[in-house]
Amino acid sequence: MIDLGEVTWALSMTEPGAFETPLSTGHQWDFVPAHVPGTVAGALTEAGLYDPENPVPLHGKDVWYEAWFDAPPGRYSLHLEGLATIAEVFLNDVEVLSSRNMFRKYSVPVELADRNVLKICFRALEPHLNAKGPRARWKPQLATSQGLRLVRTTLLGHMPGWCPEIHAVGPYRPIRLEPETTPRIVEKHILADLAPDGTAALSVTVRLENTDAVPVLTCAGASAKMSLQDDGCYAATVRPEGAKPWMPHTHGEPALYDVTVQAADNSLSLGKTGFRRIEVDHGADGRGFGLKINGVPVFCRGAVWTNADLLNLSSSRETYRPLLEKARDAGMNMLRIGGTMLYESRAFFELCDELGLLVWQDFQFANYDYPVKDAAFVAEVEAELCDQLDESMGSPSLAVLCGGSEIYQQGAMMGLSEDRWKGPLCEEILPAIATEQRPDVPYAANSPCGGVLPFSPNDGIAHYYGVGAYLRPLEDARRADVRFAGECLAFSNIPVQQSLEEGLPVKPGHDPRWKARVPRDRGAGWDFEDVRDHYLKLLYDVDPSALRYGDPDRYLDLGRAVTGEVMSETIAEWRRPGSNCQGALVWTLSDLSIGAGWGLVDAAGRPKPAWYALKRVFRPVIACVTDEGTNGLAIHVLNERAEEKPVRISIACLRDGQLPVVSGDKELLLAPNSAQTLNAVDLIGAFFDVTYAYRFGPPSHDVTVVRLFDTQTGELISEAHHFPLGRGQHRHFDAPEVSVEQDEAGSWSLMIRARRFLQSTVVSIPGFEAEDNWFHLAPGEAKCIGLQQTPDEECDDQAAPKGQLTALNFAGRVPF
């Protein structure tokens, strides 16, 4: 095998159509070193010719990639896994491929000489975007060009206000050559199933080339000789005994097993698979949407995936791993690849398999009215889906296949009747291929869909922005009766100060560069910072504009805290036993540039405060609270693990954040996969106005702390807080005790003990990431926080971490 990523590549940019064939190329003077896989934007940036912070359009030029390489002469297969977008491929100046689809994968038979040159021309996309096509029934405002509906390319880079306008051009996925005689699998179909009685079965069909041996299928200690079928494929089914089921990490172990096909002396790997069964749960009234994994209802929580590397479109394990581990560490169990993004590589699914993360895969269609009456367009779509579903074949993490994003919603919101916005693309073409390729994965026509209108949150799948962009009160999360939020809770989340100092050292409201990084909907007269400010005023009773100009640092800290507080309360509402909600995916997991973007993780890879808030409320074993007004404070206790859990739950209502005016506790034995709701009275033993709903006299307390302990170990599992008088602005001067400790293994931790309640406590330690941050801290008990050294920052491995502690209601700083 020849990996053409290991040879020397160069690119040059020309005017559109300057060179029709490669015979006349080579006279350009502006050759730039390039990488494969890679992009034009990445190569130009490395050469100092492109600024990703101020990107210029790339779709107005032809780009020629060129590589010379030596090889043993003979017949080969040229494999190209991703070309963005209109591409012509020439080997030794002979055209061997023409592609018009960024999402296709190709295998081309070629003849190599001793010395070879491979040239790829990426034609200017702009003329294709300006070309006329079939008339659209609606025109969305999402992207800059209506021509994007006619060309199979990503919308990334074309959505002002959503992401940097960095255009995807180049060979963004690997290119390799294999000798024609190499034994290989050219087609495969893998179906791993888990029956209700726990029996595992693996059915595999393969088409082999360059071997006459009868293959043998092996998985999890079970083997079977494969049988030749009428179509020339080989097929077999094995039923491994004792194979463990694959579960999302929040509910169990993501067990995986190698799958191999042995053909004589050739061991051909099909990767790993896991045994699981996915069922759609429509709820008691048939109007909901949720998932059962191996018969267990799973509350799907997580975020919408954007991209790990917008500049280079890298799809390696090394690029994916930090973000996917951040998702896992935050207690997420699902990521959704939206229809405005990019299909991810096999490495993405392999890591999700290992980490126990479910994947919701939108096909790459969004908002537009696509030309499904064009036979050539449909043929490209069908080939595209087969190529992309082959990438995730056998992957147990793939949990939902979806026809796309906001196609139905876009048409319906423009006042069109259902027969005009619901069409054959999502109802016939896509589900037919999805069912054939992955019958083990449920299909959803669109996100959102269901109900009298496709965006009604109380039916099917919703994109819920009642709490958020629509500025509804927090109570709307219950009133809307959300069934499954395919996306929700989009806020302009402010990064930590270190990231701002490194990547955006400007003050909010004082520099246009700040506003340029705040996401907005195209054509709207508001942005998502306005949304955050609305809830800042609602929860903290401050004037955001006055605070922003008078005390910008305080404005940033309150802004960092408020989005996590809103998310925590909303998720707690949806996770309570009485809720019909079966899943919520936050928009989005990560930012594509430094700034107050939608992401829970900033573009430098650092978690934002909202990430920590969700980490606390996403726990599989948790206590959370909801204010039920005159019905008191409800305490919801959940155990999503497969084992019963003995716990003790306590409550304390504190005056001035310090003096307990009433308290109580109760021991419980939580059954596996169970949830129950208690009232504060169940712990206190008598009436007490915990929510300050009756208002018999002045308030007796300002904060309520609910804790959940493991009765066997004494470990604090979860903590929830209620502020009957609001979060307020009063600050005290009672400094907590802070010390840095190191265990025998050399790991560092921070020990904190507060004398008075600390609200949104912040630990800032250069070179280290705290396992918890922006947390509330009740007085009395010590909190131990593990510290993890960040790999990309230099610091003395032997020196104790140094930093400072602050809190929103503490008028000082504690250095350590």
Image: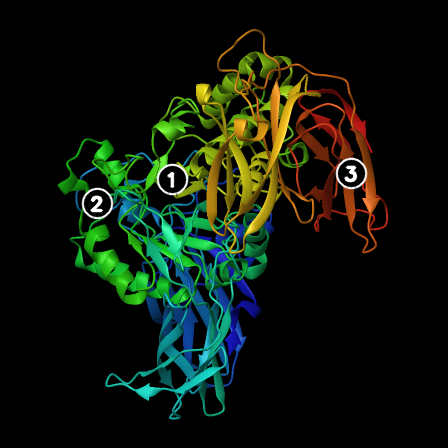
Look at label 2 and name its amino acid: Lys
Mark 3, residue position: 751
Q: Report how far apart the C-alphas of labels 3 and 2 lie in the structure.
A: 65 Å
- On residue 91, the disc is none
Q: Quadrant of residue 661?
A: top right
760 sits left or right of 344 in the view: right
The image position of residue 792, as x and y in percent, is: 70, 49
Q: Secondary structure at mark 1?
A: loop
Which residue is at 43% across, 36% downward? 574
- On residue 132, the disc is 2
Confirm or deny contact between disc 1 and disc 3 (CB under 8 A).
no
Mark 1, residue position: 581
Which residue is at 86% across, 50% downward? 798
Look at label 3 and name its amino acid: Met
Q: Which of 760 and 794 lies nearest the eye of the viewer? A: 760
Q: State whether residue 321 is above or below residue 117.
A: above
Q: Residues within 10 Å of mark 1 (few under 14, many from 20)?
A: many
Which residue is at 45% across, 20% downward? 629
- Which circle's residue, 1 or 3, is located before the other in the chain? 1
Q: Quadrant of the C terminus?
A: top right
Q: Which of 719 and 534 lies nearest the eye of the viewer? A: 719
The image position of residue 584, as x and y in percent, is: 42, 41
Q: State whether residue 8 is above or below residue 597.
A: below
Residue 340 visible to the viewer: yes
